[in-house]
Amino acid sequence: MAYRGDRGGRGRRGYGGPPSRGSFLSSADSGYRTRGVLNVDTAPNPANVKILQSKHRSTPDALSSPTATSFAGSGHAPFAGPSGVPKIAARPEKAKQENEEKLLSLLPPTMPPASVKLFDDNNCVNKSFLDFLTANNNNFTVVGIIGPQCTGKSTLASMLSGNDPADLYGDYIFRPSPRDYVEKGGALTQSLHIYITKSRMIVIDCQSMISGHFLDVALRQSRRDGIKSALRGVEDDTRRQLMLLFEVCHTIILGIDWFIDMGAIKEVLCAELALWKLKAGMEATARKINFVVAQLRAKSADFDPITVAERAAIVSGIFAESKLDVQGGLSMARLRPGCYTNVNYNVNYVVLAEIKPRPKLDANYVIEEPFGSLLIPFSDMIDNFRLEILNLPKQPFTSSDITERDWLQNVVGGFWEKLAVSDYVGFLRKDHVHY
């Protein structure tokens, strides 16, 4: 046996080097070579020389081989064409991977863990948020969080958006106000901030209701107009944002840190009345909204079953004549079955303890709880609370299903433009004159 390109047949183990593909020659006498290549013409017996060919070539012998028979029996063509190169069947794993990549390409990119403003500096819808919304998904949930200043709204919004109670404040999706900022009476959240989770929950964090911080800012910006004008502007801004949330959200969460803030309740009911007045002028039908009262930073006494039952009855009575639906079934009796058997199962009133964060790196860090045994840790409640928010009924925004992009462009953008030119925002004020 000799190889094409074999120089003199000398080399390792008698061979002259590695063989070339498809160049095997066989001869009864391999001693006749010309410059290292077997010369068939000078061989003593050329009839004994034959060229070994690959069985993959399209010859009658190859077609009658067992390999060809197995290909024919399977219904697949073994050859790609005149070149004789066999076809390579596509692997099922590769096809599955390509399908998954195609499906993932239809989804928008995952939003970074940081909220963005719903409206830009020109008071228009922030179009950069469109990059994270789909044009083919109509199964999404919109949740708005409102409440007075420094009650923990941004923290609750971050927990709903996917943060963990063990996360550091710097990792929160909705940035909370620092402690020194809170002590000075400042409010970090201005206007509306928005974020969308992987489960397609759109969370909107609203600025504080009738905040002293915003009133102080308004006074400094309009000293000539006086305090009445500044207060009127702050009230109108608060009411306009509440009316927008009532129109574009499936669920509204009112966060309070003591029971019960009647100033916050008044603002909610005034905004609701102004909205239905505006909708009546537009000849539009009213849409029911899920309304949840969440008492944040609760102490041990707030978890007492008798106290919870009494407060749930008060919440039910306050919103008995309201379009805001507080009878959705998100209650302490549902979140902690067996502990609150005497609590009204249907009233949307929950009690959430203050978050006691701990560093993730220190697994042995122990939190002292001086408030008593009735307190339920926040970490034991937030997962069920998040799931129950998603399970609340969702009234459609329009007669037909809309996608996430349609919601932002048409529902949010369209209604915000109507609010900008409407005089129903402050029609409940004594000095308001409606024409």
Image (tube, helix red, strand yellow):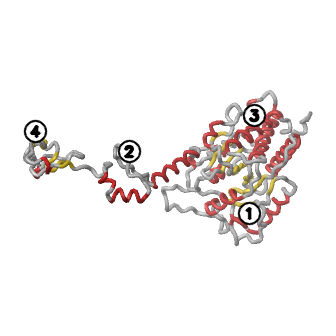
Q: In this figure, which residue is indicated by the disc labeled 2?
A: 81
Upstream in sequence: badge 2 or badge 3: 2
Tell me, for residue 35, which label it has, or none.
4
The x, y position of residue 253, in whole percent, is 73, 53
Q: Nearer the viewer, residue 48 or 186?
A: 48
Where, quadrant-wise, is the C terminus in this rendering?
A: top right
Q: Secondary structure at mark 2?
A: loop
Q: Find the distance from the CA under tag 1 to the CA under tag 2.
A: 71 Å
Q: Find the distance from the CA under tag 4 to the CA under tag 2.
A: 36 Å
Q: Find the distance from the CA under tag 4 to the CA under tag 1.
A: 95 Å
Upstream in sequence: badge 1 or badge 3: 3
The residue mark sitting in front, 4 or 2, is: 2
User: Is the residue under label 3 in contact with that under label 2 (CB below 8 Å)?
Assistant: no
Q: In this figure, which residue is indicated by the disc labeled 1?
A: 331
Label 2 crowd bin: few (<14), some (14–19), many (20+), radius 10 Å: few
What amino acid type should be assigned to the residue bearing mark 3? Ala
Q: Find the distance from the CA under tag 1 to the CA under tag 3.
A: 39 Å
What amino acid type should be assigned to the residue bearing mark 2? Gly
Q: In this figure, which residue is indicated by the disc labeled 3?
A: 218
Label 4 crowd bin: few (<14), some (14–19), many (20+), radius 10 Å: few
User: Is the residue under label 4 in contact with that under label 3 (CB below 8 Å)?
Assistant: no
What amino acid type should be assigned to the residue bearing mark 1? Ser
